[in-house]
Structures are given as C-alpha cells and as structure tokens.
Amino acid sequence: MPSVKEVTEEILGGKGFFVLPGLMSQADAASARASAIAEASAAGLAGNSARNEKIKHGTARALLHQGELFERLVQNPTIIEIAEALLGDDMTLSSYSCRIMWPGATEMGVHVDYPYWALPEPFAVRPPLMLQVIWMLQDFTETNGATLVAPASQLLARRPDRGRFKREAIKVTGASGTAIVSHGLLWHDTSPNHTDEPRVSLLINYGNKVIRPLDSRIGEVPPEVLARATPKLRQLLGLQFGQALGRDLQRQRLY
Ligand SMILES: O=C(O)CCC(=O)C(=O)O
C-alpha cells in the first residue's frame, strides 16, 4: 500500500490519478452492484433522458437511503485519509451515485469533474477543489466499459480537448473492489461496453467544504441514518460546516 503522501503527490503533480486495488471486499462490491442495478431497473433506464437512452447509461442515486453498506463505503478510512490530505479535514461529500453502463453503452464523453465544468477558466490545480473516486463494483476489463483517463491532464488545468484525449487516453482495468482516485481536473471518460453484462461503478466526489455539493440533496437522509451517523458521516453530509468555519476563523485569529 503506497503512503498517503505518495498518492496525493501523484494526484497533484504526477499522473493525476492513482489506482488502489483491494480496498473494498469483493462481497461488498457485489452487494453494492446488485443494489444499484435493482434500483435503476425499478426506475426504468435510470435518469432516462433521451441522451442517456441513446448512450445506454444509467445512474443510481440516493445511495444513503439504501442501507448501511453505502454508509460504510463512503467512509472507507483509506479514501477518507487521502481526501482529507487533499481537501482538508473538514471536506464534505459532493455527490454519491452509481454509473451503470448497460450492454451496448457508448462513451459518455470526455470531461473534467464538477465544480470545474461549472467554473470559468483559468483553473488551478492547487488547492484541489474535488477528488473523484471511481470504485470498480466488478472487474473492469478491456471490453466492458472501463474508465479512460489522460495521464497528467490535470496539469493542463483546462477543459478537455477531444483530439488530444483520443491520442493520450489509457484504459484503467482492474479487479472488483479497486478504487481509482483522481483530481477533479483529470480528463476522463468511459469506454464502450461490448459485453452483455452491465458495468457498474460507484462514484464518489469529495469536495472542499466551501464548494456547494453537486447533489443539492446530499444531506437529506432518512432519520434512522442521521440517528446512527458517525461524526465522519455528519461531516460528509455538511452538518459540521459552522464548526469548521469557526476553526478557520480561530486559525486566523479573527475572533
Ligand atoms: O464510471 C466511470 O467509469 C466514470 C464515470 C464518470 O466519470 C462520471 O459519471 O462522471
């Protein structure tokens, strides 16, 4: 296991991403995958806009309404350590969903992550505003829609250029339970799913606390989830924003 420093340095000043195998058990990955497929199937082709219908991508959201497994997965201690080293120990959860690439799914389109796509350029690599975690909920293979990344593209600190991405992108394959952690500025995409099984990723975006969460309803969880929430989960849900600001003010001796 690499040190947190090695991982964060690679994310900021190196390839922009790090692949961490075996951080989630295969049993947890399989359960999370089954829940996501069940939820998306119940909702039809989830998020069934014309565009999603065409590219055969679905999304399962509201994961914190779907049982304790998802509460545990979003607090993976290794990932939290990396996220806090990059974003501060008061960072929060910005979005939490599963991307389902049904058989025949095509690329979703190269992009940087929120909030960068919602901001005007120029962007800054430091301080990072967002860390994306792409969890492989089954093996990501050459043919089933594995994630594509352009190494070191975060250093360009600009919106993706499709031609350059095509030339430089590599496919990240790996075993179920692997996490890809990346800078929100890294250019990335999905590859086509040529198999007859859905490919599912668990997508987590952790953000600097001052960035409004992408999912504006991220803090709306069922009362029983709130009642059993750990301090870390409360932090992730943005419930400790006031205290975090208080610490910032104290550090600057403003009060
Ligand atoms: O599932 C993946 O491989 C990446 C998906 C992604 O980047 C996204 O939904 O923004």
Image: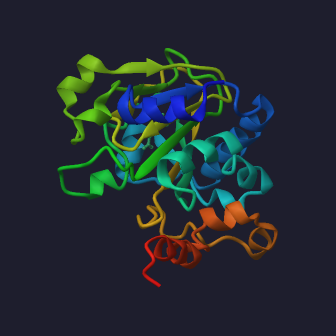
Q: Is residue 187 left or right of residue 191?
A: left
Instruction: From the viewer's side, name the closer residue of 207 and 221.
Output: 207
At 69% from the left and 45% from the top, the residue drawn is 76
> In the image, residue 60 lies at what x, y percent?
58, 51
Q: Image height check: is 14 above or below 218? A: above
Q: Provide residue 103's location: percent of width, then percent of height.
A: 52, 29
Residue 203 screen position, x and y as percent: 54, 44
Horizontal side of 122 relative to 254 (left or right) equals left
Q: Is residue 36 above or below residue 177?
A: below
Residue at (67, 26) in percent of width and height: 176
Instruction: Give residue 99's position: percent from left, percent from top.
Output: 53, 42
Q: Nearer the viewer, residue 41 or 19?
A: 19
Question: Ligand 1 shows up in which quadrant of the image?
Answer: top left
Q: Is residue 75 left or right of residue 201?
A: right
Compared with residue 141, is residue 208 higher up or lower down, i.e. above or below? below
**Number of numbered discs:** 0
Residue 99's place in the image compared with 155, above or below, is below
Q: Which residue is the extreme one toward the top? A: 142
Q: Residue furthest bottom?
A: 255
Residue 130, visible in the rendered structure? yes
The residue located at (72%, 40%) in the rendering is 34
- Residue at left 66%, top 24%? 1
Q: How is the image coloured?
A: rainbow
Q: Residue furthest front?
A: 253
Can residue 105 be seen in the rendering of this structure? no
Q: Is residue 28 left or right of residue 184?
A: right
Residue 93 falls in which quadrant of the image? bottom right
